[in-house]
Image (tube, grey):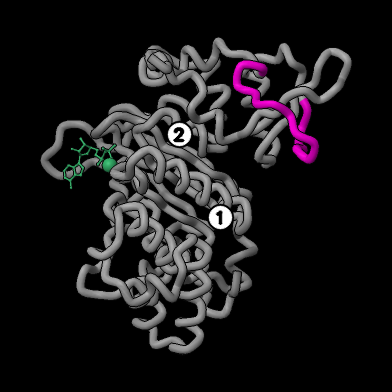
């Protein structure tokens, strides 16, 4: 992706200070005025560059507060948040936000502005080269699979919900930020389009190595997208681990409740590799798996490898079936 528009907040000497975390919450608490309990309670968590963190929890568990503290829409009551090793309170909020794309549930597009102007908002405000910006808007529209010639002059109301979310993702990417914050971005999108958007987001994550913090209350979405899942309840972090570990070794009763009581997850875990496999066709390629492997192995494999598919072998080591990553999502759904 082009770097022309990018203007880093980080001088050379600043980057020397960066530790291994791109975002680091150190004992962070947020208590809103006139409330009895903190919305986020002593959160300590380090996020490495390139991770895709899903934040999972019920309504009111503090997910949005966690996200909004990263770009200083909300400021912590106590504790410190580091971005690339620097306390965000020492950074200028506007510059910080240029490094951090932000996508909310209803897209947050301006209704009176065209798609193109919505996406170009930030560089236009900064009076950056208009021609370059327009070219970049086209590039981004293609990236989110909207034909620029068809969509750039439309207004948000002339788009479906899914298309509006594509535009907000494009807008969040305009300054080529290292981090994307996404607050239930697909929450209002129907299942089919949602699955498409999930695939596209995975692709963007993989291709551009963005660090993503993605809030959802959908267990499957959290497990499917996240390299690690942060489970929240009443402002307190309950578990922060890979999806496989959250599913297999639930840290406490609450995690079990939110993750384990779901029939489809239970059913999914009882499946074997062969239950989700499709017939193998020559040309399918990817990591290999034994036909008797359980779901834990399947998860592990997809976690370690970015391949879209994996190959199931017979006990004579011949490829017989293929498991597609995209089928993991629907695995365990009952058909009755
Ligand atoms: P989630 O995104 O998980 O639903 P939030 O972070 O929005 O949770 O909210 C966490 C808690 O903080 C909730 O109890 C909510 O009512 C409270 N809260 C959120 N925003 C405010 C605010 N501006 N003023 C007071 N309380 C708030
Ligand atoms: Mg929220």
Q: Which mark sits nearer the N-terminus, 1 or 2? A: 1
State the residue position of label 1.
204
Residue drawn 23% across the image and 63% down it: 157
- Relative side of 51 to 216, left or right: right
Which quarter of the picture shows residue 158? bottom left
Residue drawn 52% across the image and 45% down it: 199
- Residues at badges 1 and 2 in contact (C-beta under 8 Å)? no
SS at mark 1 in the image: helix
Image quarter in which the N terminus is found: bottom right
- Relative side of 239 to 103, left or right: right
Question: Which is nearer the eye, 38 or 107?
Answer: 107
State the residue position of label 2.
222
Is residue 217 depicted above or below 80 in this figure?
Answer: above
* Residue at the extreme left: 34
What is the span of residues highlighted in magenta in the rendered image? 274-288
Magenta stretch: helix, strand or loop mostly: loop
Question: Which is nearer the eye, 33 or 188?
Answer: 188
- Relative side of 241 to 165, left or right: right
Residue 270, x across and y down, in percent: 55, 10
Residue drawn 21% across the image and 31% down it: 37
Residue 41, x across and y down, in percent: 33, 34
Q: Can the viewer see residue 89 in this picture?
A: no
């Amino acid at each position: 992706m082009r770097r022309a528009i990018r203007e880093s907040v980080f001088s050379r000497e600043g980057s020397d200070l960066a530790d291994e975390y791109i975002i680091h919450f150190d004992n962070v608490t947020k208590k809103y005025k006139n409330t009895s309990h903190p919305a986020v309670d002593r959160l300590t968590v380090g996020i490495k560059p390139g991770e895709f963190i899903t934040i999972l929890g019920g309504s009111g568990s503090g997910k949005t507060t966690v996200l909004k503290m990263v770009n200083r829409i909300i400021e912590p009551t106590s504790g410190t948040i580091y971005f690339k090793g620097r306390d965000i309170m020492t950074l200028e909020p506007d510059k910080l936000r240029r490094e951090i794309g932000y996508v909310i549930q209803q897209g947050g597009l301006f209704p009176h502005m065209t798609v193109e102007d919505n996406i170009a908002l930030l560089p236009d405000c900064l009076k950056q080269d208009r021609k370059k910006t327009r070219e970049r808007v086209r590039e981004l529209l293609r990236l989110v699979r909207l034909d620029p010639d068809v969509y750039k002059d439309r207004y948000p109301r002339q788009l479906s919900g899914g298309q509006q979310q594509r535009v907000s993702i494009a807008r969040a990417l305009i300054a080529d930020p290292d981090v994307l914050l996404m607050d239930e971005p697909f929450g209002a999108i129907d299942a089919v389009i949602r699955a498409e958007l999930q695939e596209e987001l995975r692709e963007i994550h993989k291709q551009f190595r963005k660090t993503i913090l993605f809030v959802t209350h959908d267990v499957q979405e959290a497990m499917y997208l996240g390299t690690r899942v942060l489970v929240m309840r009443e402002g307190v972090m309950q578990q922060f681990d890979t999806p496989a570990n959250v599913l297999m070794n639930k840290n406490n009763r609450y995690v079990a409740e939110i993750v384990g009581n779901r029939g489809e997850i239970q059913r999914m875990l009882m499946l074997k590799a062969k239950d989700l496999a499709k017939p193998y066709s020559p040309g399918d390629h990817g990591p290999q798996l034994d036909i008797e492997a359980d779901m834990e192995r399947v998860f592990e494999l997809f976690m370690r490898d970015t391949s879209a598919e994996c190959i199931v072998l017979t006990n004579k080591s011949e490829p017989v079936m293929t498991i597609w990553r995209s089928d993991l999502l629907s695995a365990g759904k009952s058909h009755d």
